[in-house]
Amino acid sequence: MLGRVLLQLAVVVTLMMFLSTAIFVGRYRLRETRVEWRDRIRAAAPITAVLAIVLLFNSVARQIVPDLSWMIDWNLTWAIYDIEGQFIVWLQSYSTPAVTAYFSFSYIYSYVFLLIFPVVAYFALSNTRPLRELLTAYTLNYTLGLILYVFVIAYGPRNIMPELVQALLYDTYPEYQHLTRQVNRNTNVFPSLHTSLAATVSFLAYRTREIYPKWNLVAAVLGVSVAISTMYLGIHWAIDVVAGIVLAYISVELAHLLVGRWSLSTWADGRVPSLETIRNR
């Protein structure tokens, strides 16, 4: 079942990627990419390697994080519930089959597409700074998110109020349980990484709106849809979403500060970049 779900996900996202590349990136950028791809890979290789290491560490650490969290025993679930009450119940009161289908698609397909397409779009630019900022922001999201997951125990609305909050994604599309259980943990909902990563893409799309004006609008719509989907489907609290947006903002701002001012390649060579070099990056 997992293999079938992954195949379906791959097919849908690939089609979205081809369509978006044709609409937003354009032929002339792809022609330039065929000439400059080696230089662009070389420039992005250090942060790509760091991101890969962080993702690998996350996949291993997620298995032991719940045990560490319970040792610290900082459970914010009921504090979150006391603040926002039954907001998720109210939100789900507007559920319809069509709305559920849209937000289920947003949570699964739009989210994966949002993470992958900007890598292609920014790789198609001669200036590699947007690509390096994107990869750095991803790295910061996963790193800071994991730290928060270690310290904070928080169960989602569908776990705390199963009689009131519907698991709309799994009730409507039960096959997706095979996919989400590979990465999700019941105690790790604060902050919402779905929201933080989607918001990260939206923030960076806004910063590059002069290069990709249409993508800026699409990224904003998809980012908001993903954030709402996490609440509508009963997976996250509104506070988780707000925390995810804050995490995204911090990650994007830190990435903007770090890229160009601190380079893995120059550090490895024992060189300190000049101010003029930093400005040109």
Image (cartoon, rainbow, N blue to C red):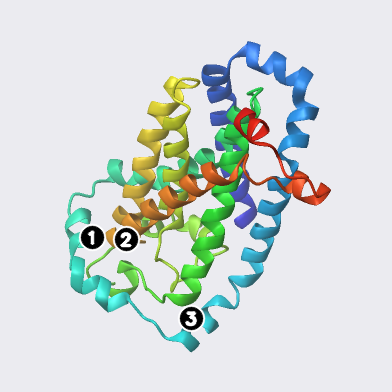
Identify the residue under disc 3: 69
Q: Which residue is mark 1?
A: 88
Residue 219, image x, y percentages: 42, 33
The residue depicted at 78 percent of the width and 18 percent of the height is 35
Judge left or right: residue 177 versus residue 60.
left
Frontmost of labels 2 and 3 is 3
Q: CA distance from mark 1 to mark 3?
A: 25 Å
* Kind of element beneath mark 2: loop
In the rendered structure, which disc, 1 or 3, sits on the residue that comes first in sequence? 3
Secondary-structure class at tag 1: helix
Q: Residue furthest right?
A: 269
Name the residue located 48 percent from the left edge and 70 percent from the top edge. 149
Q: Please provide percent x and percent y for residue 228.
A: 31, 48
Residue indicated by mark 2:
234
In the rendered structure, which amino acid carries the disc numbered 2? Answer: Gly
Number of residues whose C-alpha sits closer than 10 Å to that of mark 1, classed few (under 14), some (14–19) or many (20 or more): many
Q: CA distance from mark 1 to mark 2?
A: 7 Å
Residue 222: image location, x then y, percent: 39, 37
* Quadrant assignment, res 273: top right
Up-down relation of residue 139 to residue 61 (above or below): above
